[in-house]
Amino acid sequence: MMILMCPTSLRKIVPVFFLSAHRVSSLSVQQRHHTSQRSLNVYFDSTNNLHRDIRYHPECPERISVCVNALNAYIAQNANVGKSISLQDVAQDQAFFSDDELIHARSMLVKAHSENYVEQIERKCRDSKARRLEEGKDTLGFIGYVDTGDTFMTTETYDVCLRATAAWIRAVDDAISSGDKAAVGFALTRPPGHHATRSLSNGFCHFNFAAAATFHAIEKGKIVSVLDWDVHYGQGVADILQNEPKARYVSLHQYPAFPYEGERRRTSGNLNNIMTIPVAADSTWACGYKELFETHVLPFLISDNDTDDTNWKPDLILVCAGYDALADDELASVNLEPGDYGKMLALLKKWISVTYARGSEPGLAFGMEGGYRLQNEGERGLSAAFIETIKALF
């Protein structure tokens, strides 16, 4: 399968990690209805900076702070919309997540990975912290790197990741709730998680939050479609969900690029519930992304074929919201603009509106994955793309 190429020079080289998406004719027809407006809950952890490298690393706490600052500014400047947005710091109150919520979050991580895998990371963090206490040092310390040397760990990594898992689950609960409690949920968390496989930390990721949140929704009796628009293939989500009959996963990603998988446009997995859609370097919304999104992504996420066994109508669409397909992101070579993320979401909402009866639409939940463009980011970077996503929800 050829990767769709754009008639532009391949002027950027895909960097290696360092330290160390048939056209959908339905979208052109008049919508039957509009999806109902919901409120938006955004969850972030102000203590995410306890998980950080000791030297320069693109996966840094500033990724969250710039988005929080931008959202606060957007709320202040848009009073009517702002009334529907709740920005909540999960670390502001120790009781934000109950003990039961954290225990459940851990159990979903175990389901996505294994007890041994989760325990190893937890123990490594706990034991390192205990040693530092014995030595009279501050409990926050740098443990080191795993895999190829780009995925770092501190004494607080496990707890930061556990709160992130609980935030993804809270976002899903918002999305699948009924009545007045129904909302769009967005877990604005780090580190990313979609590269973490059942048994391997890699690509900055220790735990697979998307998989854990998917299993939570399935436990609630829901069918889930996961849309990954991060520029890198979330091979970890595919690895974990490939045998799950109540989940589908589709990734629209650059190839070649880390993790150097997903090179062909195809469905895979024992249940054909995984779809990979590669795009070439220098692809733009007009040249590559839009066509692939309409033609392949949307019909896989939601298949409205009542006459055959390909019908797939999920109760939840969970978006792995990575923003590293932005032009000049240092870890990829694709040329999306911030507004293109709003366009993707607008097309998704329109597809929902033509495939579901009013009142039966799936819930929407989002979780932050990658996105590393912080230079001039207020105009064309990470926070601008995040805000364009928020705007498209209203």
Image (cartoon, rainbow, N blue to C red):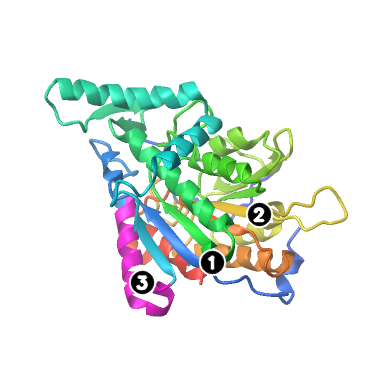
The residue carrying mark 2 is 315
Q: Which of marks 2 and 3 is in front?
A: 2
Q: Measured from the top left, where is residue 44 in percent x and y? A: 36, 53
The residue carrying mark 3 is 75
Task: Depth check: give the residue in front, 163 or 55.
Answer: 163
Q: Which of marks 2 and 1 is in front?
A: 1
Q: Give the range drawn in magenta.
A: 63-83
| Mark 2 Cα-neighbour bin, 10 Å: few <14, some 14–19, many ≥20 | many
Q: What residue type is labelled 3?
A: Ile
Q: Is residue 97 magenta?
A: no
Q: What residue type is labelled 2?
A: Asp
Which residue is painted at 35% across and 23% down in the image?
A: 123
Q: Residue furthest left?
A: 136
Q: Is residue 381 visible?
A: no
Residue at mark 2 to residue at mark 3: CA–CA distance: 29 Å
Is disc 1 placed on a helix, strand or loop?
helix
Which residue is painted at 59% across and 33% down in the image?
A: 240
Which mark, residue 180?
A: 1
Residue at mark 2 to residue at mark 1: CA–CA distance: 17 Å
Q: Which of marks 1 and 3 is in front?
A: 1
